């Protein structure tokens, strides 16, 4: 995962990425990450081995980062405002699908010479 404060270009717009302890950010109280389109910021919870019962915390944090980057792409492309909305925002099933399958799709594209 990128270092806190690094940025990622999303359709030409830079989003800063932050890895933050849950107690430092009230917006992480009920989630492991979020994307704030108003200030172009992606935040992922900084989990330690003591904070989780997951076997591979780093892999999970990368998945959360990918998930939030997908949200940023939706915001920057204009899809966020035109997507099927639930009470909590964008369709999380589709966002999660892209976050989970993205590396596999990229690997297949690379293998096929399509990148």
Image: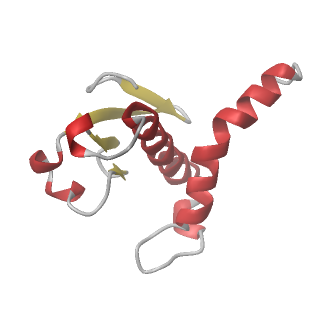
Query: How far across and how far down the image is residue 40, in percent?
Result: 34, 42
Query: How far across and how far down the image is residue 93, in percent?
Result: 59, 64
Quadrant for residue 20, please give it.
top left
Quadrant for residue 48, please give it.
top left
Q: Is residue 59 above or below residue 74?
A: above
Query: How far across and how far down the image is residue 44, in percent?
Result: 32, 42
Front residue of 62/12: it is: 62
Q: Is residue 6 above or below residue 69?
A: above
Quadrant for residue 99, please give it.
top right
**Rendered-image quadrant of the N terminus:** top left
Q: Residue furthest bottom?
A: 87
Q: Is residue 32 left or right of residue 98?
A: left
Q: Residue furthest left?
A: 24
User: Colour mode?
Assistant: secondary structure
- Is residue 74 visible to the viewer in this orientation of the structure? yes
Q: Residue at x 49, y 41 (%)?
A: 63
Q: Residue at x 63, y 54 (%)?
A: 97
Q: Is residue 97 above or below residue 24?
A: below
- Is residue 78 visible to the viewer in this orientation of the structure? no
Front residue of 35/109: it is: 109
**Rendered-image quadrant of the C terminus:** top right
Q: Residue at x 31, y 58 (%)?
A: 31
Q: Residue at x 26, y 63 (%)?
A: 30
Number of labels in the image equals: 0
Front residue of 36/49: it is: 49
Query: How far across and how far down the image is residue 67, in percent?
Result: 49, 47
Q: Residue furthest right?
A: 112
């Amino acid at each position: 995962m990128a270092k806190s404060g690094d940025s990622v270009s999303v359709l030409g717009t830079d989003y800063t990425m932050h890895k933050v302890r849950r107690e430092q950010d009230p917006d992480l109280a009920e989630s492991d990450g979020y994307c704030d389109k108003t200030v172009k910021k992606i935040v992922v919870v900084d989990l330690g081995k003591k904070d989780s019962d997951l076997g591979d915390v780093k892999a999970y944090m990368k998945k959360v980062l990918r998930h939030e980057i997908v949200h940023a792409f939706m915001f920057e492309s204009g899809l966020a405002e035109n997507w099927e909305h639930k009470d909590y925002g964008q369709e999380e099933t589709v966002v999660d699908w892209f976050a989970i399958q993205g590396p596999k799709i990229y690997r297949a594209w690379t293998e096929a010479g399509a990148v």
